[in-house]
Image (tube, grey):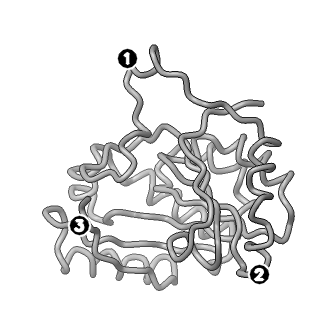
């Protein structure tokens, strides 16, 4: 089993949960966010024809992750899967999880806006699901990402019925030009009422 990986970023702190982490970032994403910080995840046909991207086996990814094992164990950190949308590569990620040391934290950063079949392979692999919901209002979400949020909301509720709420970290961004403080509060209220989770609210900084 081989998969293309956009980047592997080691020794990260304060951005992907507790402790020192290594971010494994994948190509491809169903969203077309206006202020995407990883625009390179969207590959054009021309890029696919002329560029050769590195392919890794799960064992090769594990070998890279092992380099920082001491930091994971000392800090409570571990491996984080992002992108792009990592759930589009869930079978590959599941294989990595089966090979990884059980003491490493396992986290995934996702929009959750994928078919449920992409979620199932890693449903019980993760210690933490870091979910950026953009906005509960479908018009705002669609304006910012180019697609509807209805599938994301359905998956969010389904996920909440499958795993402990302690494993779900929901992030609500205030995005300049797209949602207001009022919109953010409406999203927060929806999450509290439907998920019984207190979300993280943050100001999205355009790069």
- Find numbered disc 3 in the image and state the secondary structure of the residue it sits on: loop
Residue lying at the far top of the rendered structure: 49
Badge 2 vs badge 3, beta-carbon distance below 8 Å: no
Q: For the C terminus, which image quadrant?
A: bottom left
The circle on residue 74 is 2
> Vertically, is 18 above or below 64?
below
* Disc 3: CA contacts within 10 A as few (<14), some (14-19) or many (>=20): some
Q: Is residue 61 left or right of residue 99?
A: left
The circle on residue 46 is 1
- Which residue was labeled with disc 3? 175
> Vertically, is 113 above or below 5?
below
State which quadrant residue 13 falls in. bottom right
Residue 56: x and y in percent read: 71, 35
Q: Earlier in the sequence, mark 2 or mark 1?
A: 1
How far is the residue under mark 2 from the one under mark 1? 44 Å
Of marks 2 and 1, the one in the foreground: 2
Residue 187: x and y in percent read: 32, 74
State which quadrant residue 55 falls in. top right
Depth check: give the residue in front, 67 or 78: 67
> Vertically, is 174 above or below 197?
above
Residue 116: x and y in percent read: 59, 47
- Find numbered disc 2 in the image and state the secondary structure of the residue it sits on: helix
Of marks 1 and 3, the one in the foreground: 1
Q: Earlier in the sequence, mark 2 or mark 3?
A: 2
């Amino acid at each position: 089993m081989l998969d293309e990986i956009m980047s592997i970023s080691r020794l990260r702190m304060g951005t992907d949960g507790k402790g020192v982490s290594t971010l494994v970032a994948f190509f491809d994403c169903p969203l077309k966010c206006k202020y995407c910080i990883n625009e390179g995840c969207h590959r054009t046909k021309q890029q696919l024809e002329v560029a050769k991207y590195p392919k890794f086996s799960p064992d090769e990814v594990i070998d890279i992750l092992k380099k920082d094992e001491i930091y994971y164990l000392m800090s409570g950190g571990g491996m984080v899967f992002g992108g792009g949308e990592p759930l589009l590569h869930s079978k590959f990620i599941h294989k990595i999880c089966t090979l990884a040391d059980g003491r490493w934290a396992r986290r995934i950063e996702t929009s959750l806006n994928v078919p449920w079949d992409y979620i199932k392979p890693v449903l019980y692999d993760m210690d933490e699901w870091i979910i950026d919901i953009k906005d509960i209002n479908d018009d705002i979400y669609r304006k910012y990402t180019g697609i509807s949020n209805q599938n994301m909301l359905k998956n969010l509720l389904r996920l909440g019925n499958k795993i402990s709420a302690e494993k779900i970290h929901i992030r609500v961004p205030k995005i300049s030009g797209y949602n207001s403080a009022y919109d953010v509060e409406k999203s927060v209220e929806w999450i509290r009422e439907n998920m019984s989770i207190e979300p993280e609210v943050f100001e999205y900084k355009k790069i």
